[in-house]
Image (cartoon, rainbow, N blue to C red):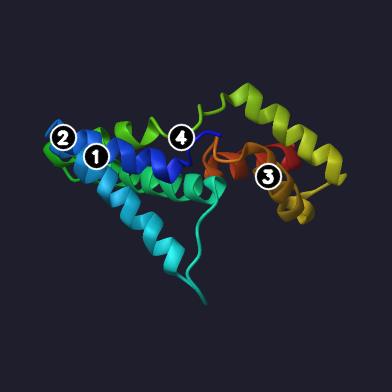
Amino acid sequence: MTESLKATLQHDLHDAMRQRDALRSSTLRMALAAITTEEVAGESARELSDAETLKVVAKEAKKRKEAAAAYTDAGRPELAEQEQAELAILEAYLPEQLDEAALAEIVDRAIASVGATGMGQMGQVMKAAQAEVAGRADGGAVAAMVKQRLAG
């Protein structure tokens, strides 16, 4: 059996610490802290599944992407570079992102499976599409594609 994503992150953190790679170490520490926070949130502590861990890593990557854009807009390229470097490290743990054609195909299948005819069923289509996308595309991109297909 392969090791869990969390175990892989912890192993890679130890390697980065041995190699004295400060950027990689701090980025993996932040990701593991976010995972731990998610594990203890709610009624009782629990171990996250790989799918749930992947969602946390994807959320952390999205934060880095948004921060990099904000720093670029604010004229702080040195801070934007730091965020982009962290994003590159996190993206290595995410599944390959879908291209627009593959995403359109998934959305079309979701629309057909739900039998959606208009914007009123957007929530149902999103639920079906997100289940198949599973972290391989940003939720905003999926929502935009669903709106485009249902409106058109």
Residue type indicated by callout 4: Leu
Q: Find the distance from the CA under tag 2 to the CA under tag 4.
A: 24 Å
Disc 2 versus disc 4: nearer the observer: 2
Q: Nearer the viewer, residue 106 or 92?
A: 92
Judged from the image, the secondary structure of the residue bearing numbered disc 3 is helix
Disc 1 versus disc 3: nearer the observer: 1
Is residue 39 visible to the viewer in this orientation of the structure? Answer: yes
Tell which circle, 3 or 4, labels the residue nearer the N-terminal end.
4
Give the residue pinned by disc 1: 14
Disc 3 versus disc 2: nearer the observer: 2
Determine the residue located farthest toward the right in the rendered image: 115
Q: Nearer the viewer, residue 33 or 62?
A: 33
Q: Position of residue 119 (x, y in %)?
A: 75, 51
Left or right for 37, reference 23: right
**Which residue is drawn at the image coordinates 23% and 33% (left, top)?**
15
Instruction: State whether residue 143 is above or below residue 21.
Output: below
Judged from the image, the secondary structure of the residue bearing numbered disc 1 is helix
Give the residue pinned by disc 4: 94
Judged from the image, the secondary structure of the residue bearing numbered disc 4 is loop
Give the residue pinned by disc 2: 18
| Residues at circles 2 and 1 in contact by the CB criterion of under 8 Å | yes
**Which residue is drawn at the image coordinates 71% and 36% (left, top)?**
107
Residue type indicated by callout 3: Ala
Give the residue pinned by disc 3: 131
Q: Find the distance from the CA under tag 2 to the CA under tag 1.
A: 6 Å
